[in-house]
Image (tube, coloured by chain):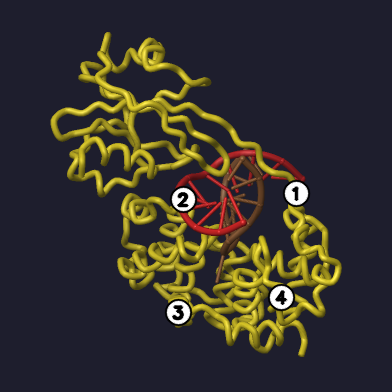
Chain colours: A yellow, B red, C brown
Amino acid sequence: MNFSAQLIAWYQHNKRDLPWRKTTDAYIIWLSEIILQQTRVEQGMPYFYRFAERYPTVTDFAAASEDEVLRLWQGLGYYSRGRNMLKTAKLVQEQYGGNFPTAYNDLIKLKGIGEYTAAAISSFSANEAKAVVDGNVYRVLARYFGIDEPINSPKGKKLFQKLADEVLDVSQPALHNQAMMEFGAMLCKPKKPACGICPVRTGCEAFKTNATSSLPVKLKKIKVKQRFFNYLLIFDEKRVLMKKRGNSDIWANMYDLPLIETDELLEPMQVLALPEMKIFGESNPLKDNSGVIKHVLTHQHLFIRFLILDKFPGEMQKDWFYADINDLDKLAMPKTIFIFIKDIFNF
DNA sequence: AAGACGGGGAA
DNA sequence: TTCCCAGTCTT
């Protein structure tokens, strides 16, 4: 048995029962693949059910609003995935009459679909012979073939894609791709791979040379930026002053509160003395403050201070509006903001 | 070629 | 803490 056949044999006895494996509907597979980008299966699962139920077909999805999609996506992160899905759903509705494409060359042109996702959808839905290369595949190939070329260098990416194409079983690409990824996720794990029960260890270069812990090689770590957010919470009876975010920073197009970002951590009184505070009215007294919440993201650490102001005699700004607290569930907000407001109003 | 983009689970 | 997850897009 060759490498692929061994992994497929392993897969058929050890695979998890996942909902998106029960269908060849390209739309449903697309839904699952986008949700699972850079996301663990357990984390994405509830979102998959939520979207599949709310939008049973791509036609239903195409009729949604961006606000609604982002609200459903709230808490999953990488929100551009949700925004791109809506664009793609609309295009599929118009250009393909609501029939989700299954050909790699069509899929690769769609927003939010890159090489991995196009290979996944085309192989799973139509058995097109395209090899998927995701984090699991990089790891399995790097270890089995003992390759120390960095997986995130342009050279490495080409090398691993070529290798993945070579080991692909073109007679059953869907099964092969599923097997490679499941094997990487369940057995050939990043930490403490289960080499003791591995069916291909006798052919595995990393196992033979005791190098599993040093493969795959990945270039440089990103450096984390620190940012200081001072949010102003201003409410009037059952209404909160809110704003829609721009489209160039984190949490694009989502909703949050009036914000003053500073270069360093300031005390509440120092924030109130800032020139930017003028639009909130002269000598607007501080009613309360929450202390500092540290919100950890992959690329930045946010130090968030919520300042509750007593009143708002200032000027309304563009993109500001009052939201009824009963409508807050409809607005897509960063999780940390949502939880804070929820807490204040006790709902 | 390098950066940006979330949030959570595991060690 | 650090790593990394069924990656893609922008600059």
Answer with mark 2 or mark 1, whichever residue precedes in sequence. Answer: 2
Answer with mark 3 or mark 1, whichever residue precedes in sequence. Answer: 3
Q: Chain of mark 3?
A: A
Q: How far apart, in angstroms, are the residues tagged by discs 3 and 4?
A: 37 Å
Q: Amino acid at mark 1?
A: Leu
Q: Residues within 10 Å of mark 2 (few under 14, many from 20)?
A: some
Mark 3 lies on residue: A25
- Name the residue at 64% across, 87% down: A172
Q: Is residue A195 above or below residue A139?
A: below
Q: Chain of mark 4?
A: A
Q: How far apart, in angstroms, are the residues tagged by discs 4 and 1?
A: 29 Å
Nearest the eye: A40 or A25: A40
Local secondary structure at mark 3: loop
Horizontal relation, residue A311 to residue A201: left or right:
left
Q: Chain of mark 1?
A: A
Local secondary structure at mark 2: loop
Answer with mark 4 or mark 1, whichever residue precedes in sequence. Answer: 4
Q: Position of residue A267 (x, y in %)?
A: 42, 16
Q: How far apart, in angstroms, are the residues tagged by discs 2 and 3?
A: 25 Å
Q: Position of residue A24 (x, y in %)?
A: 48, 82
Mark 1 lies on residue: A219
Local secondary structure at mark 4: helix
Horizontal relation, residue A177 to residue A248: left or right:
right
